[in-house]
Amino acid sequence: MSQGEVWELSGDRLVEVLATLASPHRLRVLAALAGERAYVSQLARDLGISRALLQVHLKKLEKAGLVTAHLELSPDGKALKYYEATPFSLHLTPDVVAVAATTLSTAGDGDAAPKGNS
């Protein structure tokens, strides 16, 4: 996908992407990767978070297609997993949301009122 290409997302995919971006940590990770690729230890130091927490957020970003990862060998023979932002563009308007909403599955909605509450 090119830098300026706009994603056309199904309702379920739109919910997944927006839910992934709803985390301040994941926004910071994506922002850090927007400028350059980085490996986990470097990125954790730059963001001031643990590698374990960073790994959790990177997995969610990768699952949503917002980052990609590549293994590379360092000059000393150590395997490093580099992450980089995937180019994307989201253009949300009420009409785009309306079209996406027509493709939503009903499973896992999570917005339904608990039984017994009206």
Image: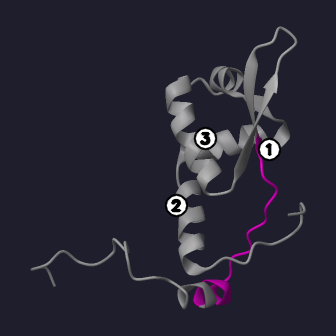
38 sits left or right of 26 in the view? right
The residue at 83%/8% (across/down) is 76
Q: CA distance from mark 1 to mark 3?
A: 14 Å
Q: Is residue 14 above or below residue 99?
A: above
Classify 10 Å Cα crowding around label 2: few (below 14), some (14-19), many (20 and above): few
Give me the disc on residue 58: 3
Q: Which residue is mark 2?
A: 19
Query: What is the span of residues highlighted in magenta in the rendered image?
Result: 84-98
- Residue at figure coordinates x 55%, y 87% from the top left: 103
Give the quarter of the image for residue 102: bottom right
**Residue that numbered label 1 is attached to:** 34
Q: Amino acid at mark 2?
A: Ala
Q: x and y percent of residue 21 in the render?
A: 59, 55
The answer to if 89 sits in the magenta stretch is yes
The x, y position of residue 87, in whole percent, is 82, 56
SS state under label 1? helix
Contact (Cβ within 8 Å) of mark 3 with mark 2: no
Residue type (three-letter) at the residue carrying disc 3: Leu
